[in-house]
Amino acid sequence: MSVTKEFKEFAMRGNVVDLAVGIVIGAAFGKIVTSFVEDILMPPLGLLVGGVDFKDLKLMLRQGVMGADGKLTDVTLNYGNFIQSLVDFIIIAIAIFMVVKLMNTLKRKKAASPDIPPAPTKEEVLLTEIRDAIRTKPM
């Protein structure tokens, strides 16, 4: 088997394609949640806690360190960005939890409802009647 044919066979398996679709959708969902947190959720939250922009929250560790490019830069601990990332994570984790919970509920419902066997055909009903009639007759 050639490498090209083997790779094509591998790539066309259902699991690989499903995984690729999941990664693409997950990345897009992550961008949407990040935008939601940065642009919609955090500004009003910042206003509620005293007009703070969370991106500006930082702890100064050292002031004016000379960088490789010759510019003075501050060494800061940007905990505001961390708070935003934490809110991103919590929202994504809750969304994934809800999707997994929904999938598990659907699987349980499907497993709980056993398949109903099909109704017997006319021939089967007739054969059952003949069998029962033969059993009841004394020999």
Image (cartoon, rainbow, N blue to C red):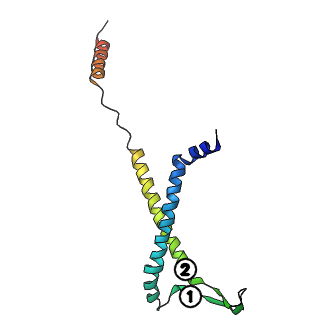
Going from the N terminus, do you reach mark 2 or mark 1 first?
1
Please identify the quadrant where the N terminus is shown.
Answer: top right
Q: Residue furthest top?
A: 139
Q: Position of residue 108 (x, y in %)?
A: 42, 49
Q: Assign the C terminus to one quadrant of the image.
A: top left
Q: Amino acid at mark 1?
A: Leu
Q: Quadrant of residue 41?
A: bottom left
Q: Residue at x 53, y 46 (%)?
A: 12
10 Å crowding of disc 2: few (<14), some (14-19), many (20+): some
Q: Is residue 115 left or right of residue 67?
A: left
Q: Amino acid at mark 2?
A: Ile
Q: Secondary structure at mark 2?
A: helix
At x 49%, y 90%, the residue is 52
Label 1 secondary element: loop
- Above or below residue 85? Residue 127 is above
- In front of the other: 121 or 40: 40
* Tag shown at residue 57: 1
Task: Check if mark 2's residue and mark 1's residue have beta carbons within 8 Å.
Answer: yes
State left or right for residue 52 relative to residue 76: left
The spot of residue 36 in percent (x, y) is 45, 75
* Residue beneath the point at 29% across and 25% down: 121
Task: Estimate the x, y position of residue 123 in percent, counting from the top left.
Answer: 29, 20
> Where 93 sits versus 81, above or below?
above
Q: Which residue in the structure is indicated by mark 2?
A: 83
Query: In 3D space, how far apart are the residues under numbered discs 2 and 1 (Cα atoms)?
Result: 9 Å
| Image disc number at residue 134 | none
The relative height of residue 125 versus residue 59 in the rendered view (above or below) is above
> In this orientation, which residue lies closer to the viewer: 12 or 43?
12
Q: Residues within 10 Å of mark 1 (few under 14, many from 20)?
A: some
Camera-nearest residue between 24 and 91: 24
Instruction: Write the residue at 53% across / 56% down.
Output: 20
**Residue 103: image x %, image y %?**
44, 54
